[in-house]
Image: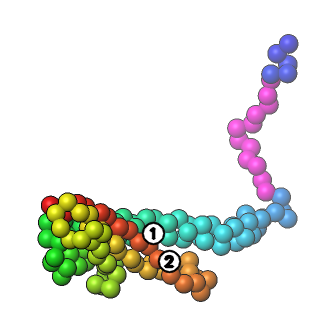
């Protein structure tokens, strides 16, 4: 009954590669490495894209927060939105920030700050692609 459970393992023996298979793993690595590198760069691009999106949304939020208190100070709204993204490596200009008072810039009406940024992926440098527009907006009620 225990004969079929009996295994014959020799601890001192090692699996020896066959003479014709000595470079097989190197060839497999050479075949798969480009795909793995493109996959890794794609994952890094997605992380950078998410970081840029969060920076854009935070910039619009900061501009709208200032605009809710000072709706007629458009220069201050631009400055607060641009300064929010200053340390992140994402450079915004006043052209990338738009301000809208949806029902007039008076108390109780919403103000919307929209930020648009054109993001360059690493993989598009490799494949000669363009940019991806990222936009985020925030609305606050003017008080």
- Residue range corresponding to the magenta coloring: 6-17
Closer-to-camera residue (11/77): 77
Closer-to-camera residue (2/141): 141
Closer-to-camera residue (61/10): 61
Closer-to-camera residue (27/109): 109
Sequence-wise, the earlier of marks 2 and 1 is: 1
Q: Nearer the viewer, mark 2 or mark 1?
A: 2
Q: Is residue 44 magenta?
A: no
Residue occupying image coordinates x 45% and y 69%: 49
Q: How many marks?
A: 2
Q: Estimate the x, y position of residue 101 in percent, counting from the top left.
A: 27, 71
Real-space CA distance between mark 2 and mark 1, rounded to the nearest whole angstrom: 9 Å
Left or right, 20 with respect to 30, comes to: right
The C terminus appears in which quarter of the rendering?
bottom left
Q: Which secondary structure, mark 2?
A: strand
Which quadrant of the structure image shows residue 125? bottom right
Is residue 76 visible to us here?
no
Residue occupying image coordinates x 59% and y 86%: 128
* Vertical placement of residue 12 versus 97, above or below: above
Image disc number at residue 49: 1
Is residue 130 visible to us here?
yes
Image disc number at residue 33: none
Q: Estimate the x, y position of residue 7 in percent, counting from the top left.
A: 79, 28
Q: Estimate the x, y position of residue 15 in percent, counting from the top left.
A: 76, 49
**Which residue is label 2 attached to?**
132
**Other-residue count near label 2 (Cα within 10 Å), few / some / many at <14 / 14–19 / ≥20:** few
Give yes or no for contact between labels 2 and 1 (Cβ–Cβ under 8 Å): yes
């Amino acid at each position: 009954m225990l004969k079929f459970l009996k295994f014959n393992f020799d601890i001192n023996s090692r699996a020896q590669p066959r003479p014709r298979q000595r470079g097989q793993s190197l060839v497999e690595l050479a075949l798969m490495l480009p795909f793995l590198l493109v996959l890794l760069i794609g994952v890094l691009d997605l992380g950078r894209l998410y970081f840029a999106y969060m920076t854009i949304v935070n910039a619009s939020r900061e501009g709208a927060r200032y605009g809710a208190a000072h709706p007629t100070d458009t220069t201050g709204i631009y400055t607060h939105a641009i300064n929010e993204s200053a340390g992140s490596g994402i450079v915004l200009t006043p052209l990338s920030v738009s301000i809208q008072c949806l029902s007039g810039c008076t108390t109780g009406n919403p103000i919307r700050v929209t930020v648009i940024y054109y993001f360059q992926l690493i993989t598009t440098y490799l494949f000669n692609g363009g940019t991806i527009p990222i936009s985020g907006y925030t609305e606050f009620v003017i008080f």
